Amino acid sequence: MESATNQQQATPFWQSALGLLGWIILCFTAAGVGSSFTVPQIETWYAELNKPSFNPPNWIFGPVWSTLYLMMAFAVWLVWKKAGWTNAPHSLGMWCFQLLLNTTWSVIFFGLENPVMAAFEIVVLWISILITIVAFWRHDRFAASLMVPYLLWVSFATVLNISIAALN
């Protein structure tokens, strides 16, 4: 733990700021890839699906996801800044894995037009987010807490996904 503290104190501001920018770029690159599969389907295939009464309006997803991606980027940056890849390879690796699963869900649900397979995948995503939160807790409790709204939103999305799969 002492080496992580020394690493944090020795990191220049510009390097820390570039690190944060890198994590933000990674998050929003993943978001962009997911959106490239999602957006073209909103007015066509997705519009034709039967949806439950609690399905939010389409406009809500953009602001919610943008906020969540910023929180995710800040959370991973805190762990990276505090512990680095050397002291937190599992935590940072889990975060990267859940981000990959996040993007993959859009490919499956919207790109492949497969709500059933997406329902299975989103459960794996939910588990990986929970594991990431637990792993982050060991390094930075605030970082872990920043991931909780994401877990809650994916919990809602899981119920929504399963409902859409059942209705179609």
Image (tube, rainbow, N blue to C red):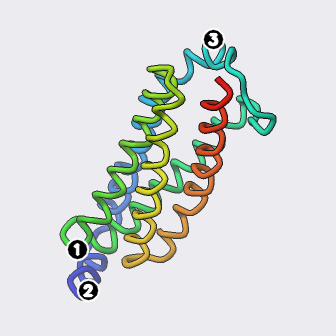
Image position of 25 with respect to 128: above or below: above
Disc 3 residue type (three-letter): Thr
Q: Residue furthest bottom?
A: 2
Residue at (47% x, 69% y) in the render: 143
Name the residue: 48% across, 77% down.
141
Quadrant containing the C terminus is top right
The mark nearer the N terminus, 2 or 3, is 2
Q: Is residue 32 visible?
A: no
Residue 37, position in %: x, y?
A: 47, 22
Image position of 32 (left or right of 160): left
For label 2, the residue is 1
The structure residue drawn at horizontal position 28% and vertical position 57%, both measured from the top left corner, is 93
Query: Which residue type does callout 1 highlight?
Result: Asn
Decide: few, some or many residues near mark 1? Use Cα within 10 Å; few <14, some 14-19, many ≥20: some
**Which is more toward the observer, 42 or 59?**
42
Which quadrant would residue 146 be assigned to in this image? bottom right
The quarter holding residue 104 reads top left
The crowd level at tag 3 (other Cα within 10 Å; few <14, some 14-19, many 20+) is few
* Mark number displayed over residue 44: 3
Q: Nearer the viewer, mark 1 or mark 3?
A: 3
Going by the numbered disc 2, the residue's amino acid type is: Met
Report whether residue 159 is seen. Answer: yes
Furthest residue toward top? 44
Q: Viewed as shown, does residue 13 lie left or right of 150?
A: left
Q: Position of residue 123 (x, y in %)?
A: 48, 48
Question: Which mark sits nearer the N-terminus, 1 or 3?
Answer: 3
Q: Are the two marked residues, 1 and 2, in contact with CB atoms closer than 8 angstroms?
A: yes
Question: Is disc 1 placed on a helix, strand or loop?
Answer: helix
Mark 1 sits on what residue?
A: 87
In contact (CB < 8 Å): disc 1 and disc 3: no
